[in-house]
Amino acid sequence: MFSKTEIKKILKEKDLKALKSLGQNFLIDEKVLNKIIKASELNKNDFVLEIGPGLKTLTNELVKKCKRVVAIEKDKKMTGLIKEEGRPKATLANVAFGFPSDLKIINDDILKINLNELINKHSENKKYKLISNIPYYITSPVIKLFLENSIQPELIVLLVQKEVAERICAGPEKLSVLALSVQIYGEPEIIGYVDKSAFYPEPKVDSAILRIKNIKKNYSDEYYKKLFKIIKIGFSSKRKKLINNLSAGLQISKEDASQILSKAKINPNARAQELSLEEWNNLVGTS
């Protein structure tokens, strides 16, 4: 693992910068790295997708533990650095970066790539894990992409912003659209918290290691579409009671909305954040 001083030297040698626009914050805390690896439950047959390998701090540990790693890096210059092959020059940067045979670096945007094509190409059985220190500004779209994809990962382990991790793992009475959109598909948990000092450059927020296990789809795509529609209607105005949001969103009278809630065995005075996932499923069945 590189220290802050070493990272500065590498970036200077290669005329690179940590780009704020790409959320580049490099991990410099070995204890955090070890926690991520332990949480990933890796074995020698695993295929891992990594987003934003950066200086390969996490990548280098992944390739030691599993069969294949495909890392997607949006920064073209950074991709060029970590793909360097041939006899290294006597510089810190070149000595540090090898190119293992079971590692593939792809210069692309994870939100634009053909994900299923990528998985089918590199995984014989369509099984894979998503393990990454992702740019925080793409946390929600990345999680949505992988959980809603037709080929879901077996396991997700991500370094994300602390507050976002806590929102995702929230329990009843504190649920949000984000929390429900994750808990519908899997079981999220916070493995540990990470201080901002564990990165260079140091971000403005603390982080958390988020793990999502037991990922699966229990319903049809049509059902999920209806469920998300009802959830978004329910949260359309957080200060209002659920009955008012349903009435406005479904364009029905309050009396009809009250009947729907009654059939679902939900208190008509409840607000969206107070409902459990089971109650949202009941609501879909009656609406």
Image (cartoon, rainbow, N blue to C red):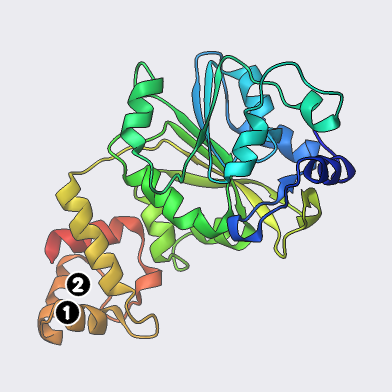
Mark 1 lies on residue: 258
Q: Amino acid at mark 1?
A: Ser
Q: Residue at x 89, y 44 (%)?
A: 5
**Residue 136 horizontal/vertical position (percent):** 58, 56
Q: Is residue 266 above or below residue 22?
A: below
Q: Residue at x 23, y 59 (%)?
A: 227
Q: Residue at x 72, y 36 (%)?
A: 33
**Residue 125 horizontal/vertical position (percent):** 34, 18
Pick the front one: 42 or 99: 99
**Residue 177 horizontal/vertical position (percent):** 38, 64
Q: Say whether residue 108 is visible.
A: yes
Cα distance between the residues tagged 2 and 1: 5 Å
Callout 2 touching callout 1 (CB < 8 Å): yes
Category of crowding for the residue at label 2, using alpha-carbon neighbours closer than 10 angstroms: few (below 14), some (14–19), many (at least 20):
many
User: Residue 118 appears in which quarter of the rendering?
Assistant: top left
Q: Quadrant of the C terminus?
A: bottom left
Q: How many marks?
A: 2
Mark 2 lies on residue: 261
**Residue 174 horizontal/vertical position (percent):** 47, 67
Mark 2: which secondary structure? helix
Mark 1: which secondary structure? helix
